[in-house]
Each structure stands twice: as C-alpha cells, then as structure tokens.
Amino acid sequence: MTLESEVRQHIGEIVEGLRAKDLEALRRVYAPDVVSFDVEPPLQHVGVEAKLKNWAKVFTLFEKVDYELRDLTVHVRADLAVGHGFGRISGTLPDGTAIEGMWVRATFVLRKLDGAWMIVHDQASVPFDVATGRGVADLEP
C-alpha cells in the first residue's frame, strides 16, 4: 500500500464513522491534540474531545447521517500529509425530513504518529460574500 493510499484510507474512516454515527471510530482518526477550524464557533476547537463534541451534535440532529467527500487531493511526504477537497454532511431528521446539506471546503493535515496516520489539523470553511459579509452556502463543486 502506498503512503497516499494509507492517507486516503484514513480520511475515508471519517466517512465510515459518520455514517455509522460512531464517535469511538472517529476518535481513532484524530490526534489527541487535534486543532480544528470548524464551521461553527468558536474560531478553533482544540483536542479530540472538542472535535467529537461537534460530531455528537450532528448525531443528535440527524437520525441518519451521510457524508460525501469529493475531489480529494492528497500530498504525502514521509510522516506528513495534506489533503483537501469538498465535504458535505447530509441526512434524515428524526421526523423523516431529508436534508441535503451544504458543500464546504475541507482541509486535513495528518502526521504519522507511532506508526499510524492521525489528523492533527482540519478545517471546514464556507466562502463568503465580501460585500455583505454573509456566507455563501449554495455553491457546488
């Protein structure tokens, strides 16, 4: 298996963990001291517990969760990797309403720690209109 395929597989575990609504599977993806720049406040979430708290909110909102990652580009050098693409959480609410979600820009930074790839930083961002200061949530890759 190439380094790139190892990294892609590790990032793919996020998709599997979300679809299974499995916080423990997601815990294994992130470094204990991960720094996350997520779409919801505050500006940064530090540590795996803070990251998992965000995912737990998603699991509370959706009865069924789906996550799609498109156009993932990965660059790997020895024990450091960067990936970027577009992600979208969608799902079904407890009342049966289907939610399509919005596309965000997703960036992942991984390090090989004790022989395993771990996400040490991630960022999800929404483009914004400079004139209005409002996020633009209807764009598609």
Image: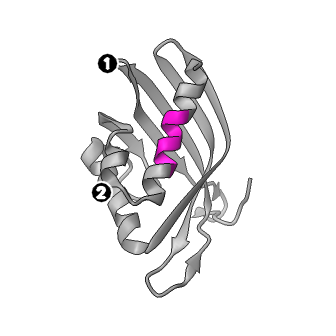
Residue at the spot x=55%, y=84% of the render? 97
In the rendered view, tell whether residue 78 sits above or below residue 118.
Answer: above
- Find out whether residue 79 is within the magenta segment: no
The numbered disc on residue 53 is 2
Seen as rendered, the residue at the extreme right is 141
Q: Closest to the observer: 65 or 37?
A: 65
Q: Closest to the observer: 1 or 134?
A: 1
Coloring scheme used: one colour
Residue at the spot x=53%, y=29% of the render? 7
The residue stretch that appears in magenta: 9-15
Q: Is residue 98 left or right of residue 43?
A: right
The kind of residue tagged 2 is Lys
Q: Main secondary structure of the magenta part?
A: helix
Whole-Å distance between the Cαs marked 1 and 2? 25 Å
> What element does badge 2 sit on?
helix
**Residues at discs 1 and 2 in contact (Cβ within 8 Å):** no
The kind of residue tagged 1 is Asp
Seen as rendered, the residue at the extreme bottom is 95
In the rendered view, tell whether residue 90 sits above or below residue 67.
Answer: below
Expressed as whole percent of the image width and height from the top left, the position of residue 30 reads: 36, 38
> What element does badge 1 sit on?
loop
Residue at the spot x=71%, y=61% of the render? 139
| Residue for badge 1 | 114
Looking at the rendering, in which quadrant would you find the N terminus? top right
